[in-house]
Image (spheres, helix red, strand yellow):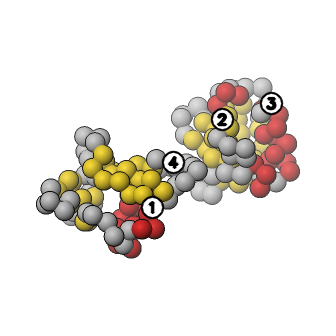
């Protein structure tokens, strides 16, 4: 059970009411570990960026509060997950990648090999020339063709 109330006001902004009656409008949830533990450790920040509440696990919250936080996170976060790499224009950078993600087909320009970062043993984060982060959650789950392309850059 949480020690706060969470609602959405008529303008669509999250409103957190603390047990002492203090009301915070424009609350923003922020994941502590967005890749490794996306449902654990969520800070609820006030409009000025100060932490006003901490959620250890989303699953511990009542369904209504959990849904509000998940909706807000989805609207704020954009990190497509790469499911397949179709082609790359060159193995020298900069180059254009044509990929399939969990959000559809797209292409992006990789500026340099340093824009591919290992997060874990089989997890990669790729940043395009516009600063959009693409996630490879499990390198070993990609098809052979996609892994072969990535191996050339790693």
Q: Residue at x 39, y 73 (%)?
A: 63
The numbered mark, 4 or 2, whose residue comes first in the sequence reads 4
The numbered mark, 1 or 3, whose residue comes first in the sequence reads 1
Of the 4 image quadrants, the one containing the C terminus is top right
Q: Name the residue tied to disc 4.
A: 33
The numbered mark, 4 or 1, whose residue comes first in the sequence reads 4
Residue 90 % position (x, y): 79, 31
Left or right: 133 as drawn, with respect to 93: left
Q: Name the residue tied to disc 1.
A: 57
Q: Residue at x 25, y 40 (%)?
A: 48
Q: Residue at x 67, y 51 (%)?
A: 137
Left or right: 123 as drawn, with respect to 65: right
Left or right: 112 as drawn, with respect to 59: right
Of the 4 image quadrants, the one containing the N terminus is bottom left
Q: Kindly report the distance in space between the C-alpha atoms of the residues bearing marks 1 and 3.
A: 42 Å
Residue 121 % position (x, y): 72, 44
Q: Name the residue tied to disc 2.
A: 117
Q: Secondary structure at mark 2?
A: strand
Q: Secondary structure at mark 1?
A: strand
Q: Nearer the viewer, mark 1 or mark 3?
A: 1
Q: Kindly report the distance in space between the C-alpha atoms of the residues bearing marks 2 and 3.
A: 17 Å
Q: Write down the quadrant of residue 117 in the picture.
A: top right
Q: Name the residue tied to disc 3.
A: 91
Q: Nearer the viewer, mark 1 or mark 2?
A: 1
């Amino acid at each position: 059970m949480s020690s706060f109330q969470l609602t959405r006001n008529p303008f669509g902004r999250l409103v957190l009411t603390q047990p002492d009656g203090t009301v915070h409008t424009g609350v923003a949830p922020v994941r502590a570990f967005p890749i490794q533990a996306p449902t654990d450790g969520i800070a609820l920040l006030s409009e000025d960026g100060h932490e006003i509440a901490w959620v250890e696990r989303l699953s511990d919250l009542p369904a209504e509060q959990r849904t509000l936080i998940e909706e807000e996170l989805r609207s704020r976060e954009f990190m497509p997950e790469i499911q397949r790499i179709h082609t790359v224009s060159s193995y020298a950078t900069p180059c254009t990648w044509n990929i399939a993600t969990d959000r559809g087909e797209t292409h992006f320009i990789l500026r340099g090999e340093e824009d591919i970062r290992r997060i874990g043993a089989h997890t990669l984060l790729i940043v395009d020339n516009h600063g959009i982060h693409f996630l490879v959650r499990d390198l070993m789950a990609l098809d052979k063709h996609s892994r072969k392309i990535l191996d050339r850059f790693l």
